[in-house]
Image (tube, rainbow, N blue to C red):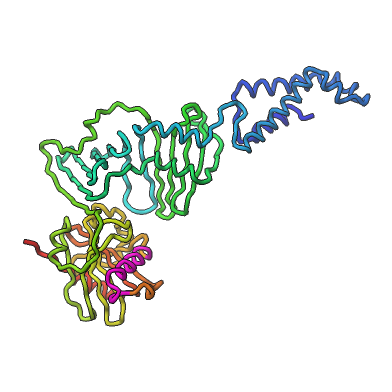
Amino acid sequence: MKSPRDIEQELANTHIRPRPELRRRVLESAFQAQAEAGSERQAARSGSTWRLMMNSKTTRYAAAAVIVIGAMVIISQLGGSWDGTSVAWSQVVEQINNHTRYKYRERVTREQGPPIPTMVVYHLNLAQRRQEVEDGTIHVIDMRGEDAITVELDPATKKAVVTQVLGFGPRKDPDIIGMVKRFEQVSTERLGTKEKDGATLHGFRHAPNEHNDFTVWVDPDTKLPVEIELKHPTRKQTIFMDEFEFDFDLDESDFSTEVPEGYEVETVVEDYRPVEAKVVKPETLGAELSHTAYTLGKLPWVKTSTLVQMTNPLMRRGKLFVVGVRTDDDNCVLVVQGSYYTERRMVWLTEDRLVLSAPSGPRLFTHPNGAIYAKLMLEGIADVSPDLFEKADLSEQRLTRMVAMPNGVVLGVCANQPLEDGRLLELAGALQEIKTP
């Protein structure tokens, strides 16, 4: 028979943590059995050991204690719980689907790039969100209509940026409710329990691919999230969500996209409506982009050139304008522009990614997913202009650079074959603003 010390060690070695009262009862029974076991030993030698042991009340307690521990281990391994406090992932899904109004704090850590400020996020419903950022700015997002709209308010400077995203809605926010529904369809790993602020939380993990790794800790009573950690291994960043509240006191007017009086307003338009792929003129590009548009001046090593509009192949929606050229060494080079191509939005354009600076002012950066970017852009231009590029010619040596202009506009440059630094600098220097009336 196992000693109380053995029993206590088995308790410690399990992944579960019994409530203090049950732990006390189990160990008291074991200690009592050990104290009285001496009077039973002589009888045990008579050959009726099991009968006498089971006729002893205290020994039955000790045997029961060992059985309880074994059951605890088995139940734990099967994903249940010994004391009725088990949490099944289906229960979490059921409870969280009852709450479309909730708030949480969001923090992001990253190995590279500028820091992302902490914010408190309020979801009024699945299409309206408010973000209060630690720098004092406020973001309001409304995706209920055909055209989504976001408003960024800076109360300190009385400036506002209103972004109209045409054809983006109506749609639901990519929030935790959508996240857990995806969890239902695949294997979700149990992580056991952990203690936080005197409470026991139950953990689950779901890693659907190499880009996303979710960990969710829930309250066993409410079956609702207390903490969520989302790791992006390829981007080398982690998003932490905590301080969840599933009922918050905030008026619906706080989710309005009307800019308060007295604000200076900048309007940005992003077009996500279906796009007809076609060749366009420079004046079309200048009229449709919400920032300065560029064309490419003459270069001695460019044989042919075309300007097209096409669907953004990265998101399979939205509009891009692409200058495509064929060089004298049969390389295909693309210059890509879109309304959201600005340094303010591309926060990953950091100094550690800077590789070249042109005398005229443009700076050239690497792209964190440059090979994928170039592949999709080249395949996209092949669909529009097969005379310029064919998918069968896609090279593993393809190159991507992002060109940041002095005024904050960013252009993407990708080439099917390596492009030497001298030509990259010449290309950046040949970018010319498109003047619009």
Residue 298: x %, y % from top left = 17, 76
Q: In this view, does 231 lie to the left or right of 44?
A: left
**Quadrant that contains the N terminus:** top right
Q: Position of residue 196 (x, y in %)?
A: 48, 31
Q: Nearer the viewer, residue 97 or 37?
A: 97
For residue 323, above or below residue 138: below
Q: Indicate the quadrant containing the C terminus: top left, top right, bottom left or bottom right.
A: bottom left
Q: In which quarter of the image is residue 395?
A: bottom left
Residue 123 appears in the picture as rendered = no
Report if residue 26 lies within the magenta region.
no
Q: What residue appears at the point 46 percent right and 27 percent down from the top-left corner?
A: 222
Compared with residue 206, is residue 69 higher up or lower down, i.e. above or below?
above
71 left or right of 417 in image: right
Q: Nearer the viewer, residue 328 or 180?
A: 180
- 41 vs 83, left or right, is right
The image shows residue 124 at horizontal and vertical percentages of: 30, 33
Q: How many labels does the image show?
A: 0
The magenta stretch is 371-389
Q: In which quarter of the image is residue 343?
A: bottom left
Of all residues, the one furthest to the right in this rendering is 46
> Is 147 or 290 nearer to us in this picture?
147
The answer to whether one can see residue 204 in this image is yes
Is 92 displayed left or right of 77 in the figure? left
Q: Main secondary structure of the magenta part?
A: helix
Q: Residue at x 31, y 66 (%)?
A: 380
Q: Is residue 384 magenta-colored? A: yes
**Image quadrant of residue 316?**
bottom left
Residue 282 point in image, percent of width and height: 15, 67
